[in-house]
Each structure stands twice: as C-alpha cells, then as structure tokens.
Amino acid sequence: MNKPSINLGRRAFLRGVGATVALPSFRSLGAETKAAEAVARSVTATGAPLRMAYLYVPNGVIMDKWRPEGVGSDFKFNHSMKSLDPFKKDLQIIKGMEQINGTAGPDGAGDHARAGATFLTGARPRKTAGADIKLGISVDQMAANYIGSETRLSSLELSCDAVRKSGRCDSGYSCAYQYNLSWRSATQPMTPESNPRLVFERLFGGGSNEERKKSLAKRRAEKRSILDIVMSDAKSMNKQLGRNDRNKLDEYMTGVREIERRIEKAEGFGPPPNPGVDAPEEGVPREYQEHIRLLFDMMLIAFKTDQTRISSFLLAHDGSNRNFTHLGVSEGHHGLSHHRDDRRKMDKIVKIDTFYSEQLAYFLERMKSTEDVDGKSLLHNSMIVWGSGHSDANRHTHDDLPIILAGNAGGKFNPGRHLELPVETPLNNLYMRMLHEAGAPTDRIGDSTGVLKGI
C-alpha cells in the first residue's frame, strides 16, 4: 500500500484520507450516536412495532366548516372533513391546543415561518435570514434518539416542497424554518426527500429485489475495504502531522468509527426486505395529489416493513401559495388565506381544506387495511398527528389549532371522539404523551406543562 506523504496539502489530505468515503456526509450522522443507547423498544403490548407520524398542512383552515359538530363520541364531521367519516372510530379531533412560540411576541411579522418552525419543536426560532439559525430539536428526532436504533432508518422525512436551508423567506426569517419540519438539533434541520423514487431506493435500494440484494452486498464490501485502507493510512500519517492536523485526523477517525457502527447496524438487520411493490417512476409527479399519495405509500411500506417507526411529512410549507385549478381555485392558497372574512374566498379555502382531508383519508384507509404482525392494523399500532401551525391564517392565530390524532397507539389511546381541552393547552403536552408511549422519556418540550392524559 502506498503511504501518504507529509507534503499533502489540506485539500489533498482530505482527498487522500477521507473523500473516498465521503467524510463530510458521514460526519453529519454523528448526532445520531444516542440512538445506540436506546433504553426501550417502541412496541405495543402485543409486540408489534409502534409507529409515529407527524403530518403538516399549511395556512390553517376555515374553522366553521372544519370543526366537528358535537363533543365526545357523539359528534359529526363538518363539511371539509366528510371524507374522514369511515375512520370516525380511529380519530380524536382535539380542540384547544396551541403553540405559544408561534405568536409574534417581540419578533413581529413572520407568522408563517414560526408556524412551521414551532409545530414539532415548540421552540421560538431566532429571527434571522442568515446562517445563524437557531430553533430546537423536534419531537420526532427526540424519539429517534431513543428508539431509532431499533430500525434500519432512525426516521424518515418527506416533503412535497423543494429543499431549502438558507435564504430569506418570511419577514426576515430564514427559509430553513419554513421548509423543514424536522430538526436534529437547534441549528441542523433534517433534510426531507420529495422524490418518491429516491425514498424507495433509500429504503430498499435500486432495481429488482435480487438486484438490490446484490447491490447492498457490494456496497457493504466496498465500505469495509475502504475503511480498512483509511484506518491504515490514518495510523501511518498520524506520526507525521502537526498538532492541528492530528486533531483533524482524530476527528476523522471518530467519524470512521461511527461509520463502522452504522455498517454493523445495517449488517445486523440483514438485507432489506422485499417491499412487494415496484419502485415508483423516476422524478417528482406533476400532479400534487399523486405526489402526496406516492409519498404516503412510501411511508406506509417503510412502516409495514419496519424500516423505520418514525416519520414526518410536510405536505406544503406554511405560506405556500400553490393553486388548485383542478378544484376550480386559480388563486394561490396563501393569498386566499388573507380573506378578510370574504365568504367567496373562504369557500375556496374550504375546497382546499376538503382536498387535504381527502389525502388524509387515503393514507388512513391504506394504514387501516394493512395487517400488522400481531393481526391488528398498522393504523391501530400507530400514533399519527395531522395538523397545522395556524388556526385562522387570516388573523395569524396559533391557538385552537386544527389537530387530529389518528390511531390507537396499540391500545393505549381511546379514539372516536371530538375532545375539548382547556383553552391554551400546549400542543407539546400531546407530544410528551406520544414520547412516553414510545418509550422515549423527556422532561420538557417547549412550553409543555406535563404529559397529556385523557386521550
């Protein structure tokens, strides 16, 4: 083996020692080391995996056409939620929840950025359009840090929007806040994937099932031989480097050890299972509904094959101005949401609200009709939050949020109700309860005041 030369410059050093294993991308996984310290398995009483999903829709709803009529189990779905009637016994529509850090406070305008940013984190975003973004870890990643080691993927992040982590979007807030629902840390969003084909290949690899098995074996063999070479080079180089470069090399070796751990984890799971379906067509679907449903399908097969138990899905960022011409709505959603009580505009938003409810109904039907390992349905063994960071987008309110909780959590929840909570109940209390059921304890999320009971 050729030994590296002490005369290697900084760029050559990175190329000679680390680029063949894409060191920068591997090091970005370092924050997941807590997953190896999982203290509990995310399973139900019957031993089936317990899944959790967080689904976000933009710009609030027209509440007088969305909120169910009646309370408790004696309720009726309103106009824009009629499509959910077949799942009445699987849902809890929860009234009275808020995200206090979505409100303006001293930060002024920017409610759409704050709505999306706070929805899963409960944290107030730093108002900046620069690189100094700061928010907080999201509830899905809190769960992933505890139970992510139980599956091949710690979590799965999806979006129908393009990826944006920088730039100015809403009244001085970085685009990172609006386009990323899931956050690994206060400064690092989890990049969502919008291409169903790439999601499939991330879960199962490319090609047929046999081709994927061969490809996986080849990739593992290559990674193993590359690591052996890199570690040998690193040891021989260490004696020749100055102090600063030795520190860099130590940092690199830590990354190598993390890669080795992840390879061992993947090998422990064996080859990816056969999902039983063909990979989606390449590219992002042109029709929005097809895009949403394909990504829901990817989430379902990830849950079904136990590739992951945690997922988030940003159907559209808050402030999205997508039009819905197929519904007879040519104006943009965001523009319409500032309706100033114009019933004509509000009726168009009701059509959009109905559309989104229909997409949820599609996903629930797929989850409910898929049998789990214990003979129950995937929906029974899940905790699914559907909601928005706005209630009335016209007034930019962040209280009385439209929140639906679907699934039985393996028998721990009591669905089939329209539940009225005291006003200004932190949404984060619900998240605390979900973490509790998943075996991922935490003391606090945002403004949480405790674990939500009675659901």
Image: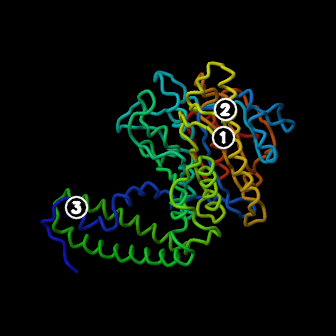
Quadrant the N terminus occupies: bottom left
Q: Earlier in the sequence, mark 2 or mark 3?
A: 2
51 relative position to 166: left or right: right
Q: Secondary structure at mark 3?
A: helix
Residue mark closest to the camera, 1 vs 3? 1
x then y, percent, for residue 295: 59, 54
Reading the image, the residue beneath label 2 is 97
Q: Secondary structure at mark 1?
A: helix
x then y, percent, for residue 288: 59, 46
Spatial CA span between label 1 and label 3: 47 Å
Reading the image, the residue beneath label 1 is 430
x then y, percent, for residue 261: 44, 68
Residue at 56% over, 39% down: 445
Amino acid type of the residue tagged 2 in the rendering:
Met
Amino acid type of the residue tagged 3 in the rendering:
Arg
Q: Please say if the residues under marks 2 and 1 sit with CB atoms less than 8 Å apart.
A: yes
The numbered disc on residue 248 is none
Amino acid type of the residue tagged 1 in the rendering:
Leu
Q: Earlier in the sequence, mark 2 or mark 1?
A: 2
Quadrant the C terminus occupies: top right
Reading the image, the residue beneath label 3 is 246
Give the farthest residue toward the left: 7
